[in-house]
Amino acid sequence: MWQEETIGVNGKGFILVLIIALIFLLVPNHAKASGTGSFEVGGYWQPPIYVGGDYNTNAHWANIAAANIDIITGIHLWNGVMNKAANETGIANSYANNVKLQVSDSGITGKQTFTPADITALQTTLTPYKSDSRVKGMNIIDEPSAYEMEGFANTYKQAKAFAPNIDYYVNMLPSVTDQRVQAPYGKLFLSNSGARGSSSSVTSTHSLGQTITIPAGVTYLDGVDMYIDATQWSSTEMLTLKLWDSPSKTFLMSEALALGTGLTEGWDYYHYFQLSKDVTPLTTYYLELVHNGGGNNLIGGVTRSNTDVYAGGAAYENGAAQTYDFFFRLYTTRDNQGTNYENYLDDWIQYSGADYMLYDNYPFLFGSSDNSSYFQNAELVRGRGLANNVLYGGFLQSLDGNSRTVTMDMMRWNVYSLLTYGMKKMNWYTYWRPDPAASFPGTPVSENGTLLPRYTQLQTLNSEMRKLGGTLKDLTSLRVYHTGTTLWTGTKFLPPNFFVKPASLAEPMIIGYFTNASGRKYVMLTNRDYTTSKTLDFNFNPKPGSLTEISKTTGLEVSVPGYNAATGVLNLTLSPGEGRLFALPAGFTPQLNLAAEAVVSATSSLESSSTGWGKILVNDDQRNTVTGSLGWSSNSSIHVNHTESITMDLGASKTFGEVDLFPRNDTGNVGRGFPIDFTIQVAASSSGPWTTVVTKTGYPLPGNSSQWFTFTPVTARYVKLEGTNLRVSAGEYRMQLSEFEVYAAPNFAKGSLVTSTSSVENADWGVAKLVDLTRNSVPGLYGWSSSSNTSTNHTESISFDMQTSRTISRVDLYPRNDSGNVGLGFPIDFTIKTAANAGGPWTTVATRTGYALPPGLEQSFTFTALSARYVKVEGTSLRKITTEPGQPYRMQFAEVGIH
């Protein structure tokens, strides 16, 4: 929390050891991030229990309930031993006021679990709480370090199994650059952590060893850590851990060398030896620890048990088998090769089986500046919460920073920024002011329970969260984007094609996009400025027929006076830091790309959030290969040509007739990974049967543009790209895509040969930018603009050669929609014509005169279906570009679609 806590190394001896084998390879049966029906507003620090007094009165708990708090966490800092009797007043009065108390108990809070004896002690302490229906929660640990993760995960898992009626509090560290979140390189699959109680010494003439048996299902040993007394291991002493085929040491398979750190923090006792070796399941190997000299040629304190506690092997000293075992933990490859912090979060969920993830990172701590890691932390927690399919939430700041008064606007910003990220557990730090008061300025409640001015602010914001929570509890976050001239660290700028955007991208906004289990979509629009109110337009494209808002006072859907269904424009006023939640009509699909929200599976996948590869990055609206979002890459059998596939589950049967594949386009790698021979297949079921709709052989290396494939529209739920002949690069055979998109009907403008009577061709404009699938006008992708005779009104046209005869019935013209230029360049009088041949004759299919200035949304023109190869849009009366010097006459479009 606010003040860092340090937990020392425990050298407690144990007789029996809990062997945790394979448990970490299983998928936990925890609640999902979507459809949980759970949203909680909480606070840290219940009314305290001092040696001289207990503040857990009914009046104080009534104030907690009146503050619209659902849950509050107990502490045990100032009264010595906490037990069931000491907690009685808190239990009784929290229950009487319908507030969940997560009690602290000295026998559970801060305790790790490794052995059967630990489990027995845990269950004994839990028993009186388990049998008391008033007890709703228990505090296990606040901010465990990475090296403690296994022990606290065991406590959580064992407590939840024994007393599933109780909720258990664990709060993770924020994304800080310290050793506490430095998770091991690999994923734990076998632990002998309880082998403690004694120790042995390794010297330059006396080696230590341990036989290990690899469990079923494990084929790779990434590393091993052991518990070695850091006070005896100097920075001049070298140890080597060797992996042998057996104690006879016939074949050395791998080895890892390490120097001591010379430090004595808790994590320095757990050294990771990275062996990186393929292993055979159910096979026994031999680990040998050797001292290579240096220091005093002796390191004591290599931790072991006193008895034989591991059935899969035995300890050795100088090659002789012993009747005890060493402490060791074995690790394999991680599913997600992420940052240390992401691995730390993954470890908690995957080892404990917990159904939520909670963290604390406060925005207003540092004088007049803000915490630069605030949004980066929110991004990482959201990402791992969704990846592990669990609830996630964060702490909110309810006290002043260092020499800085936190205002109501700042608190509102804190609340709505996290809600926009999809967080469902919102906890204030702190509710009660601890002693000494000087360390905690500006709390809602004083050290003796007096209500302070911030109490009413907390009460108001909690009420709003609770009302919105009735809807938010069932929503899954799909996207979070930012706008503004300056982005915070770790955030993503709103993509050009996203369906809702502020009229001015320079305004600092956060846009959250959500879905519920039935597929209904929601957006939260949040003012990222906590000092200034904003009144601005948001453009929806495509246009929802209606828009409703979730009321912050009733929780009900209410009409939105500021929305114009005809134009798709929402005029909105947002207070500083305020967010508002809007519901789109049931059945409305804002994403034209049917794969935008698909569930992605693949025969193999390089999952590395630290470099930007992963299945979820192949449909994240990012068509370019950029840092942090490279796309998807296969990751198996990379040294031989083979078959790989990637499949999009559209969530329900849909009709579609086009697949667009975007190759890698990062510098030096354009087209790399695009298959040579491949098919596109569709199916109603994930198990097939599969129908091939596209077959390509000998496909050339693509350039820096999408590869689009059209076919007779089909109805299916699954779309699979299968590469049977992969492209080799740097000796590796991989299939790679930047983005995978699916469309209901072919857009024949894409891939057309485009010509025009005149054209501005530069970094922002050009005929090619008219058919790049970017419907919005943004720098570098504004679209097409005519360039001739700009001083007088005249005729301009743009033509599309679809390269073969197509049956078409609709042309979509997308106006400019960049800030200040919305609709400019759209012709006043124009026709749309079709032809079978380049020279005509031309058939007019649509005529418009006196066309009003359009909003920044597509203008669709339908006609009776016909067969044609050429389409022409001809403007005979042009609109002045009033924002350019001289107000020239130009015809301009952001995009054209032909269907």
Image (cartoon, rainbow, N blue to C red):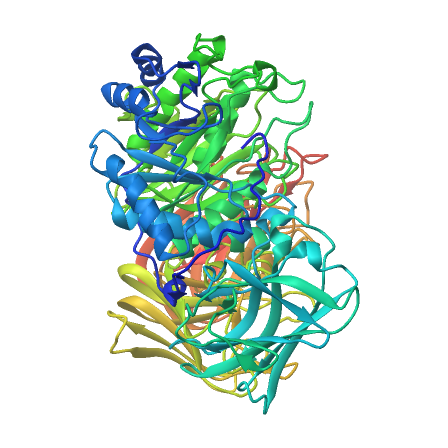
Quadrant assignment, res 364? top right
Left or right, 865 with respect to 636, comes to left
Where is 48 relative to 421, above or below? above
Q: How many labels sit on residues?
A: 0
Q: In this view, does 699 lie above or below 480?
A: below
Residue at screen point 37% across, 47% down: 156
The spot of residue 495 in percent (x, y) is 54, 48
Does residue 589 show up? Answer: no
Quadrant showing the C terminus: bottom left
Identify the residue at horizontal 63%, vertical 42% (top origin): 489
Q: Nearer the viewer, residue 664 or 604?
A: 604
Residue at the location (67% across, 18% down)? 403
In the displayed structure, 789 sits above or below 807; it is above
Query: At which x and y percent is residue 378?
Result: 52, 41
Q: Which residue lies furthest to the bottom in this view?
A: 250
**Residue 338 shows in this picture:** yes
Answer with the quarter of the image where residue 45 lies: top left
Q: Nearer the viewer, residue 210 or 547?
A: 210
Give 203 or 791, whichever is nearer the viewer.
203
Q: Is residue 700 left or right of residue 540?
A: right
Q: Where is residue 162 in the image (x, y as percent from the top left)?
A: 26, 48
Question: Against 408, is 855 above or below?
Answer: below
